[in-house]
Amino acid sequence: MSDIIQLLPDHVANQIAAGEVVQRPASVVKELLENAIDAKAGYIKLIIKEAGKTLIQVIDDGVGMSVTDARLSFERHATSKIKTAEDLFELNTKGFRGEALASIAAIAHVDLKTKQEQDEVGTEIKIEGSKVLSQEACVNPKGTSISVKNLFYNIPARRNFLKSNAVELRHIIDEFHRVTMAHPGIRFDMYHNGSEVFNLPVSNDRQRIVNIFGGKTNEKLVPIKEETDLVTIHGFVGKPEYAKRSRGEQFFFVNNRFIKSAYLNHAVTAAFEGLLKDKAHPSYFIYLEVDPKSIDINIHPTKTEIKFEDEHALYAMLRSTIKHSLGQFNVAPVLDFNRDASMDTPYEYKSKIAQAPTIEVDRNFNPFKEEKQRTTATSNTQKNYSAFKKEAPGSWENLYTGLESEVSSNDVKQTSFSTVEFESEEQTGSLFETDDKKDLEHHTTYQLRKKYIVTTIKSGMVIINQNRAHQRIVYEELLKSITMASAVSQQLLFPLVLSFSKTEITLLETVKEQLENTGFIFGKLDLGEIEITAIPSVVTEKEVATLLEQLLSDLENEVPDSGFSQTDLLAKSMSKSIAVRSGVELVPEQQRYMANSLFACTEPTITPDNKPTFITLTVDEIDKKF
Ligand code: ADP
Ligand code: MG
């Protein structure tokens, strides 16, 4: 048999290598930003279109490249950063593999413009699928601009594998956060679809974190500091009371490189022992400086995992440093002497005219409400939709659950407990006021364990799961209002102001139109705050914050792609937040409403997540049991 082994042509090898380096638009962002940092840029601008699917551009004012280097930079294993294997142990640069540009150029349309300070003219190279289309002299300021268009244009499988814009944008923003947090001494801007998402001036660590995550972050941070021969630790941990259920803001940087480490994460969590509520995750921004010789960055192609020489010592040190800082913070308010005075004014506000401070008030407090409660509590008009939406589980009412079962269910309504239970009447627009009481009007309904609604049908009986049924009802209503833009809004007396990070706001913007179709009206959406002037009639003001938080986490985690499924995701997420929970008592009218509306649905049998909403028991089946 003749020889069958042959060397792969370069463009094929590059495409294969690209698979390792470039998983998604965010990987390109990371590589380009890191190259700009290695080029000693003082200002780096990131421009994104369509979550990086159509354009990723990075412009820097760094050292630039000569004509020859510009051409060479696209070769595989072409790097200016190391010369020998020993250099790997003295790394001060982000890159060193010389693979990024070659990989990116293999799977996209790339346009590079670069000029060194001393040169008269710069160089422009256009390259597509590893093929150089042109190389010419060009006018360019000192530095480099690389634009990457139509990522994965020649690997349709990869392109189709990309997730929705919301998800891909989230990944890009995550990378941007990691890189910018590690380099507060560099100015960064980021634009998405023409609008500015971040504007980060040169600053210190703390300011950078605050500029990224919003003004309110400042008060949440507890500084940590420790210096030993092995390591210098500095940075911040979030105060325990601000810990979140989602693992959000957790960052380790080693020698200014973001890294992931389950082991060190454990050290931090251990330091918080006993201070956190169940399942809450602390936020942390921790910078470690170690001797480059004592770590190995080379174990992962994207360089986010590294090996430490003395991991155990590092663990112990990190834990005790954080414990110490938290302890100090517990006994006395933190006096941060290193604090920069300009921190008191968030950067964006510097040039603005001072505004009177806003006072934290209970936005749900309504002076007229109490009056109303008093008058309505005795009158037995408990039709209100919001009335049965009070969340019983987990509240003080649990204390009475035993008691209640001792009283017959009819009596319960008359007792003072129930008067309290139904007092929350914030909303007059009510689903129950639609006179939708037709079919089951005369049927008797019964609520079982505040969880199921039992009623009869011709063939026997139906047991409806109140939470699931309501999810289905709300879901279909929302779908209708989103697609037909027919929602009913309730105007709020005072606009509701909620704070979100810029990232979250950018994500909300991707579904703003759909949200408006459900009945939300936004006053403004920027600077870490959103102002809501009207909300859908099916939601109460109290629920809005949780609803939007749930929506954000669903948006990040699910995989919607077409416009339709985005709408679907939104309706699903909102219906879950809005639907009446089990544990909530429903008056007969509400029970009938629930049954009627469920059976008026297009798909009454299942929830939007395909779980059964009710079961039936036919008379035959009952007969058999006797
Ligand atoms: P690496 O960063 O691992 O060296 P890359 O493929 O990312 O490999 O880049 C190859 C080379 O191109 C770099 O070593 C550097 O010399 C040059 N280069 C890339 N981007 C820039 C930039 N923005 N400014 C100046 N030089 C750059
Ligand atoms: Mg690089």
Image: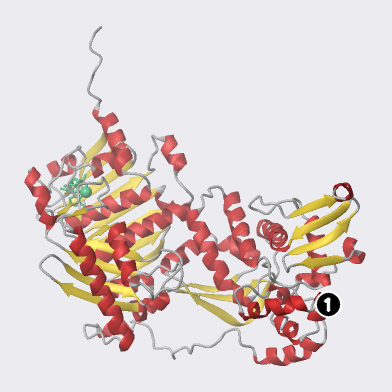
Q: Quadrant of residue 194?
A: bottom left
Could you say which is closer to the camera, residue 404 or residue 542?
404
Q: Residue at x 59, y 58 (%)?
A: 570
Queried on whether the Cβ of the residue with tag 1 lies below 8 angstroms from ligand 2, the answer reads no
Is residue 209 shown above or below 153? below
- Percent position (x, y) of residue 240? 38, 76
Q: Which of the two residues, 108 or 426, is positioned nearer the viewer here?
A: 426
As shown in the figure, which amino acid type bears the numbered disc 1? Answer: Asn
User: Along the horizontal axis of the image, is 300 left or right of 26?
Assistant: left
Can residue 186 be spotted in the picture? no
In the rendered image, which residue does mark 1 sit on?
410
Residue that sits furthest to the front in the current view = 626
Residue depicted at 67% across the width and 67% down the height: 581
How are the residues colored?
Answer: secondary structure
Quick check: can you spot residue 394?
A: yes
Query: For the image shown, how many numbered marks are present on the structure?
Result: 1
Q: Closer to the camera, 345 or 91? A: 91
Question: In the rendering, at what x and y percent does residue 524 appear?
Answer: 51, 74
Q: Is residue 453 above or below residue 407?
A: above
Q: Does residue 195 appear left or right of residue 469 in this picture?
A: left
Quarter of the image for residue 234 reads bottom left
Q: Position of residue 22 (x, y in %)?
A: 32, 44
Residue 251: x and y, percent? 31, 64
Image side of residue 196 versus residue 313, left or right: right
Give left or right: position of 323 versus 478: left
Label 1: how many Cα within 10 Å (few below 14, some 14–19, many 20+):
few
Q: Quadrant of the N terminus?
A: top left
Mark 1 secondary-structure assignment: helix
Q: Quadrant of residue 33?
A: bottom left
